[in-house]
Structures are given as structure tokens and as C-alpha cells.
Amino acid sequence: MGRTGTWLCVLVCGILGAACSGDAEPEGDPLPAEAGTILAASSSAMRAVTSVRFDLKRSGADVYIDQFESLALDKIKGRFSAGSADAVLSVTVDGSLRTELGAVALGGQVWLSNPVTGKFEVLDTGYDIDPATFFDPEHGWGPLMATLTDVVLVGVEDRGGKRYHVRGVGPAEQMEIVTAGLVRDQDVAIDFWLKRDTGLVTAAEFSTVFEGKTTDWVIELSDYGDNFEIKTPELDG
């Protein structure tokens, strides 16, 4: 994919296949099985989120996180809490070497671990990565669930528990926010799996196309409301 992404997100989560939510607590009564009601509840629930764990896996065409198109993103595992986030990015360097990078966003500052030394450094201008923007419940996920078009309730499926499976088309503006800028300038058909009592999103799958090449994304969201402590990374000197 010949273009530098902001990063992804995750989320918006490595992806953990179909074993997604990790939420073992019993659910309340299911929402009515009607797409409009489910999405209205989902929009409200996603706007109210204060913390969440996200996992993401990319397959297909490469997406790069640096302007030199050297670091191709493979997957991300991270945590969001009160506007801050930390994450581990699995990347392929120059098409051959696989490694992991750490990223932390806290108090308006972003740090990324150096792919050579492994030491955390203040984000260089050659990168455009902010893990805190991957999960934006107020401006991203909430509005996304409220502005989906061509919505279909596919049914109830077992994906880490019984989930509503909803399919719709996400507008380009919201898709750019929930993917922290990796998806731009295109409406995207997307499948969601949601908790039946609250509408919280536990998984999403979609594909994007850039310059004729397709990238497939899987995002998993779990551990809503858990207490995550995001710390400033240790720096040399």
C-alpha cells in the first residue's frame, strides 16, 4: 500500500481470531433484535467508554507507519484509558525482518521505541502514530454507529459469546477517526459484532482498497471499563 498511514489502529485490536471479547460476566436482557434500536444503543454505549483493550490484525496489501515505507504494520495490541494509550506494534522491516515496537501516548506526548535499539524516543517527524487516537469513543465510534448506512441485522452469532452481527457502510470521515487515519477518503462496508445487552462493539471486520490493492482488517475490543495504568516510558539519560 503506497501510502503512510497514521497508524492503526489497533484499532481501532494481534487480532485474536474469533476469540474476541474476553468479557466473561453475564449479560443483561438482550436489546430488541432490530437494527435501528441496536445501533442507537451502541452509539450511546460507545460514546460513554472510558477504557478498553484493542487488538488489530492486518492482512493483504501492506500499510506503512513511516514516511519511508520501511515499516509495514502487521498487528497491534493495545490499551486505551481516559485519552491515553499504550500499544505493541508488530511490524515487518524492509519486507523481511519482523520485530515489535512499543508506542505510548500520554498527556499530549507520544513515544515510540526505536526499531534498532529498542529504546523509547519522542515520536520523530518521520512517523505519524498516536495510539490514543485509535479509540476515540466521543468523536469516532459513537458517531460511526449512529451514521452507518445500508444497515442489515445479519443475526445472532457465537463470537466470544452470543453477539448481534450487524452490517453497514461507515462514512469516510468516521472511518478515518476510528482507524487513526489509516483508512482515508473512502466509505467502507463493515461487519460488527455487538454485545446484545449494551450494544458495545466486540469485533469489526472490513476491507479497504488503495491504488487497486486490498487490505483486510480485523479489530477486537475487550475489557471495557477495566483499570489500565498508562505509564510514561523510561528514557535513557
Image: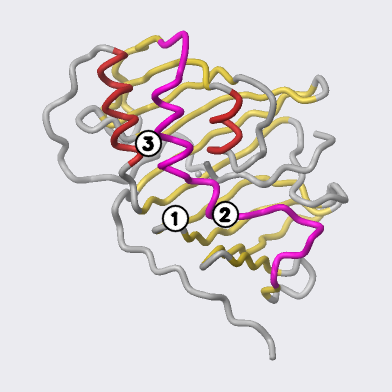
> In this rendering, is residue 205 above or below 9?
above
Magenta stretch contains residue 228:
no
Image coordinates of residue 159 in percent, x first then y, are: 35, 30
Q: Secondary structure at mark 3?
A: strand
Task: Decide if residue 159 is on the left or right side of residue 26.
Answer: right
Q: Which residue is mark 1?
A: 80
Question: Which is more toward the observer, 50 or 197?
Answer: 50
Q: Which stretch is magenta?
A: 122-151
Query: Which residue is painted at 44% across and 55% down in the image?
Result: 80
Q: Nearer the viewer, mark 3 or mark 2?
A: 2
Which image quarter is the N terminus in?
Answer: top right
For disc 2, the marked residue is 131
Left or right: residue 230 versus residue 134 is left
| Above or below, comparing residue 56 to residue 38 in the picture | below
Between marks 1 and 3, how big is the CA–CA gap?
Answer: 15 Å
Looking at the rendered structure, which numbered label has been put on residue 202?
Answer: 3
Contact between marks 1 and 2 (CB within 8 A): the answer is yes
Which residue is at 23% across, 33% downward? Answer: 198
